[in-house]
Image (cartoon, rainbow, N blue to C red):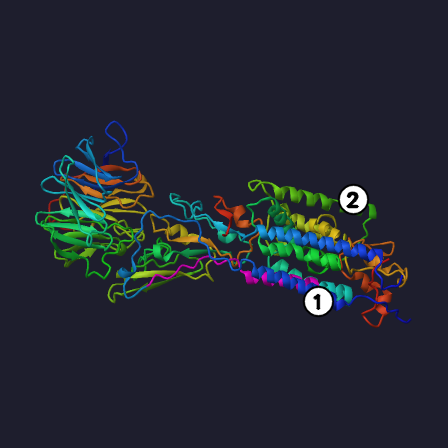
Amino acid sequence: MSKDDLSRRDVMGMAARGAALAGLGGVSTLLAVKAHGSDAWYIDTSKCVNSRLGALGVDTCLRCATECVLPLSAVRAVNEFADCGRCYICPAYFDIHSAIDADGLPSKKLCPRDAIERRPIGWIDPDDPANNFYEYLIDESLCDGCGLCVMDCKEPAGLGSIKLEVRHDTCLACNRCSISIACPDEAYELRPTV
Amino acid sequence: MMKYRRIGEMGAPGAKGARFEESARAVACTSDGFWYLAGDQEIHAFDSEGKQVGAWPTSLPAWSLAVDRGGRIWAGEQGQVEVFSPEGHLQDTWQNEKLFGFLTAIAVGERDIFVADARSRWIHRFDHNRGFVNHIGDHHRKGGFHIPNGVLDFAVDLDGTVVVANPGMHRVERYTPDGESLGYFGRFGQHDPESFPGCCNPTNLALGPGGQVVVSEKAGPRVKVYDPHGKLMAVVAAGDDFDLGCKNMDLAVDTEGVIGVVDPIERILVLYEPVDAPVATAGVTS
Amino acid sequence: MKAIREPTRSRSGSIRWLLSHALAIALAVIVLPGLNPAWSQTDYSRPVDVAPSEESIGEGYVTPDVQRPLATSIGRQLFDLGLLAVALGLAAWIVLRRRSRWAALVLTVSCLAYFGFYREGCICPIGSIQNVTTALVDPSYAIPYFVIGIFMLPLVAALFFGRVFCGGVCALGAIQELVLLKPIEVPPKVDRVLGSLKWIYLAAAIVFAVLPAVSRDFIICRFDPFVGFFRFTGPFHMLLLGGAFLVLGIFVGRPYCRYLCPYGALLSVFSRYAWKSVSITPDRELDCGLCDQACPYGAIEEMRAVRTSCLACARCFRSCPVHRSCETPAADVTQEAA
């Protein structure tokens, strides 16, 4: 038998590899057919203590910012503009318990990372700044999802237009999400995305 | 500073009548001691002892109540006003698609009827022939008063001045019936009891017999009394008196200075009376 | 000594084969239901619906759109899959063709930096066993296509080139490689007994992954001893365990890989009939035993490389006098073993 002919060992090897590839291919196809999309982590705002109505007078839960394994958490605060009151004194933007400055506004801002931007919108009253509506925009590159603004926007203090959301383009989708493990209200859950 | 004392409740569960099941929204009182409370889709009437003496349905949920000189009850609703006799019989339904959006306050005088529309954020003035006379608040800014809470509340003084709560600007404002501004008092402040805290306070307003301004606040629910010039006279209720989630607590004050506050969480009417000297006379100076 | 050249299959052809099939996998991921639409979070109903309207605000103000959570980035997933395929191909080429220990080390450290520290060690093929198992059993569980790819690629690579994933790419293996300073030999019987532990761990991982969702537990992720180092944070007992493994790993070569890794159990099956792998040709080897001494993983027995245990670290090449004396790197040290 010349060296170019296939030995029995070669044939066994090819057969085994072929069978293994077929097996892998079959399992992949089976899984891919069953999977129409993927699961992702979501925050259930009806359970999250920072968002859910009735949970008043309690400390803000900061875990969405502190527990994520990424250096900047994948959770962000999002302001539903259509639901926002556009108030002159926003309890989520200002730290309303801070001292009042010369303009009659609180001197400190609530967000520890200064991620909220405030600007007057629409028709602007040149004489009276209190007579304007203000838009509050959250800068996603600064926000770390700590939830302080979410808690202070909640009814009745505010209108509850700010809530926490998971940014799936950043989230690693770990099997055991460390935020989910730490969440005391079981508000962080894996859900199908379609 | 004056003091007030809680003297009782109306509409609480018990032998005196049925409590509202979902919500309590508005209150009005008469000069002879009857109180009317609107909630769910009904109006309940109580006598001065708090016994429920009547209850009748409204065709839409009532958001505001007023009682006119004849004792008829005017209920402001969404898109319409319903007028009931003191016994609760529906006498009239007044609809106005354009101007009646969401009526959260109503006042009926001898010549004028004022309604507060939370949709357009203005107060509309009509005469008794249902003819529109003028808006109040329309040259404040294009959008009217700032009411993020969704409730615009006002009261009309004996001389016709319209006193309006403007919560987004933390003010109590005064207007002539024609809509001219007569000034305002109040400012934002979280710590000083005389200022209005949080995002939007005061939410509701009523006038006492001596011209005092009684206001209610949310997020730190409070009821306070100011003199006509804006100086704080009393903090009627604060802290634990109401659930932290209370907001838009409607007010009414009777001729003896007893303040009725709607508790929207408990769905009852809570009454406070002044403990010290009786009410101040009209035109009091600060 | 004249090199005896024997006909072998073209090496570059095999690399091309692998790359072209990795591309096919990547293409399949694109073609299948592509970009997922944005979804909203749970509905949050507010009792009062009275935010100021655009007319009230005036001056042509338009309420801006609220940014919704974007879909998981397909681009990033494809990039990671592509990188994994490239790293596997590179590992195969470095270990089997270049046979350079130094290059293998550089590749290992790079993969540790990217897949370990930058990607926070997640998603890894070891944990993906559980996702695959759950998806096969639970009809309501949707496994991302990306995870299927992560699971399959190193196994396909093992079918053709042996455990190159272990040697060049796995971040958990890499961190243990770096601390292996004074390797000792584990007695073969002990090695064999301990080696069966990984099958028990694999079985336990499967059992926990097929439990119903309320009691399901991803134990491979929970008991990953090294992920705490990648993330600079973790439960104290896991950090302690990881530290213990690393201290042990100074002396015992890659203890987690050889005795516990459930994916290693799978790889040992798939590498058994590898098309090309590290092997010692009987008619060229000198019987000097230097490779056996150099191999810290006990993968050389009776002067023959054991494919299922070989972790493709290329240390044997570095110590082999024949390999060092050959002038062309394309010498035929790797051939189908007898």
Residue B269 in view of the camera: yes
Look at the image and give the residue range highlighted in magenta.
C62-89
Quadrant showing the N terminus of chain B = top left
Query: Do we see residue B274 in this rendering?
Result: no
**How far apart in space, not on screen, are marks 1 and 2 (Cα)?**
39 Å
Number of dots carrying numbers: 2
Q: Which residue is drawn at 63% across and 58% down?
A: C116
For mark 2, what is the residue?
A: C193
Q: In the shown orientation, is residue C150 left or right of residue B32? A: right
Give residue B111's mark.
Answer: none
Answer with mark 1 or mark 2, whichever residue precedes in sequence.
Answer: 1
| Residue located 82% across and 52% down the image | C185
Query: Is label 1 in a helix, a strand or a loop?
Result: helix
Query: Is A148 situated left or right of C93 in this image?
Result: left
Q: Name the residue under label 1.
A: C16
Q: In this view, does C241 lie above or below C108?
A: above
Q: How crowded is mark 2: few (under 14 residues within 10 Å), some or many (20 or more)?
A: few
Q: Which of marks 1 and 2 is in front?
A: 1
At label 2, which amino acid type do we have? Val
Chain of the residue on which disc 2 is drawn: C
